[in-house]
């Protein structure tokens, strides 16, 4: 997130999502183990040397098979990683560091494909060391980009994204909240419905996009096709792009390049790690020194088009995939003024009063989920911007929804 949305798990139970006693995952190779992970419809596989594997199903961790030794795990990972980083994977971290010197990395990222049920399945892998042992987290990436409806995203928001010709679009949320999937949905719609030249800079490449009838997309992976997000943006501007997707804003250089690209007539889509829309503005500006605050706020006020902040929440219905809750902020006069003055409180107020400009508050969406039976009240109140308002709304008899209900997957 890829930050992926999950289908119903056939092994699901109310609290402990446990597999049948007769089901034993195949740990003879990482590919065979991951094939069973896919069949269990899990989003992630967690591996630590000498420990039992764990999988994440609908947001919950569960054990998955017998313990895998540190030596076996090293071989499993070495069999699937790119040759250029294979020497970094060693059961003895000190030995590997001594042998490789400055080229040694304690953390590795890569992606790979393997066959599951006759079809290619993609995975994103992070390898690390913990207390001298190897560890890995493998994210299962869906083979196809889902539709907006299936992902739980409002179609009218996606339509507005496709209509933008320039500017900056931020998708925000914590790790595992589905940001990568949301970006993929947006980008796929742009490719299908436009004649755009699209460039992506990702670490690693997650969803592989097909070509539209007239659009052209090139996907570049950091560490494989390009040195960094900043370098990908710098040289990408020389490749006649209309749309640029940057996997994540992590540093000042990438933020500045993304802002410059948006300012020079390109549409830039990217992610930041924040819990809400106004936090995305704060996170972006905080990457720069204080003396540049006014300058960056002015640039952001002019070029920001939309912020979509999202959460994946546990479904009230046992065994069902998680529920997408989101907040949408579009740029209008109050939002622009609030960003220019770096007034986060005013940004929040602008979202609350911006319904006619397409704004959607998180609390609105949470209430819709409660009314539809997808969320329980306790979960909604934990994530609400204003828990008291939700409690009052839900205690009002025959309270109609305040906006047109979307068609949920």
Image (cartoon, grey):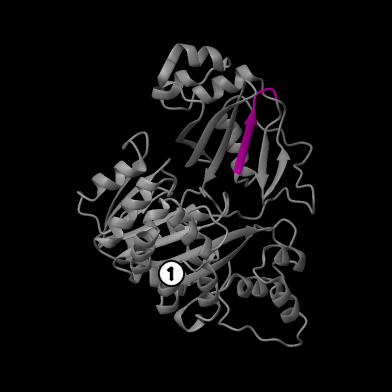
* Residue ID for mark 1: 341
- Of residues 125 and 116, the one nearer the viewer is 125
Picture coordinates of residue 283 (x, y %)?
Answer: 48, 55
Instruction: Identify the residue shown where x is 67% and y is 72%.
Output: 386
Using the image, determine if residue 58 lies above or below residue 315: above
Instruction: Identify the residue shown where x is 54% and y is 43%.
Output: 140
Find the magenta span and give its range.
Answer: 44-50
Residue at the front extreme of this rendering: 291
- Of residues 291 and 401, the one nearer the viewer is 291
- Of residues 150 and 91, the one nearer the viewer is 91
Instruction: Identify the residue shown where x is 70% and y is 27%.
Output: 51
Using the image, determine if residue 49 lies above or below residue 295: above
In which quadrant of the rendered image does the C terminus lie? bottom right
Residue 205 belongs to the span the image colors magenta:
no
Tell me which corner region of the image, top left, top right, bottom left or bottom right, holds residue 158. bottom left
Q: Main secondary structure of the magenta part?
A: strand
Using the image, determine if residue 25 lies above or below residue 268: above
Picture coordinates of residue 304 (x, y %)?
Answer: 38, 66
Q: Secondary structure at mark 1?
A: loop
Q: With 57 as the anchor, is 239 left or right in this view?
A: left
Is residue 119 at least partly visible in the picture?
Answer: no
Picture coordinates of residue 126 (x, y %)?
Answer: 52, 34
Q: Residues within 10 Å of mark 1 (few under 14, many from 20)?
A: some
Is residue 349 at least partly visible in the picture?
Answer: yes
Picture coordinates of residue 381 (x, y %)?
Answer: 72, 67
């Amino acid at each position: 997130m890829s930050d992926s949305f999950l289908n119903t798990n056939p092994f699901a139970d109310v609290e402990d999502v446990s597999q049948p006693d007769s089901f034993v995952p195949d740990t003879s190779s990482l590919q065979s183990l991951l094939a069973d992970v896919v069949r269990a419809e899990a989003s992630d596989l967690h591996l630590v040397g000498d420990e039992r594997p764990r999988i994440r199903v609908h947001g919950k961790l569960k054990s998955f098979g017998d313990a895998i030794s540190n030596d076996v795990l090293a071989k499993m990972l070495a069999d699937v990683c790119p040759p250029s980083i294979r020497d970094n994977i060693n059961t003895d971290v000190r030995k590997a560091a001594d042998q490789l010197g400055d080229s040694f990395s304690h953390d590795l990222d890569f992606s790979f494909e393997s066959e599951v049920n006759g079809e290619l399945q993609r995975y994103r892998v992070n390898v690390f060391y913990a207390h001298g042992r190897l560890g890995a987290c493998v994210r299962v990436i869906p083979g196809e980009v889902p539709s907006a409806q299936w992902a739980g995203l409002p179609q009218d928001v996606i339509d507005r994204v496709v209509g933008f010709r320039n500017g900056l679009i931020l998708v925000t949320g914590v790790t595992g909240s589905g940001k990568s999937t949301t970006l993929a949905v947006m980008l796929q719609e742009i490719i299908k419905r436009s004649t755009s030249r699209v460039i992506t800079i990702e670490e690693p490449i997650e969803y592989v996009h097909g070509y539209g009838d007239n659009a052209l997309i090139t996907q570049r992976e950091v560490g494989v096709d390009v040195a960094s997000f900043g370098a990908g943006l710098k040289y990408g501007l020389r490749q006649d792009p209309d749309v640029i997707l940057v996997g994540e804003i992590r540093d000042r250089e990438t933020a500045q390049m993304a802002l410059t690209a948006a300012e020079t007539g390109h549409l830039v889509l990217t992610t930041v790690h924040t819990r809400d829309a106004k936090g995305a503005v704060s996170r972006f500006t905080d990457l720069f020194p204080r003396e540049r605050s006014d300058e960056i706020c002015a640039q952001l006020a002019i070029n920001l088009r939309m912020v979509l902040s999202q959460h994946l929440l546990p479904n009230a219905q046992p065994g069902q995939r998680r529920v997408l809750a989101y907040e949408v902020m579009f740029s209008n006069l109050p939002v622009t003024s609030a960003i220019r003055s770096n007034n986060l409180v005013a940004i929040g107020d602008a979202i609350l009063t911006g319904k006619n400009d397409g704004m959607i508050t998180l609390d609105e969406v949470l209430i819709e989920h409660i009314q539809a039976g997808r969320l329980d009240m306790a979960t909604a109140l934990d994530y609400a911007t204003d828990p008291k308002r939700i409690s009052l709304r839900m205690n009002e008899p025959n309270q109609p929804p305040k906006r047109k209900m979307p068609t949920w997957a």
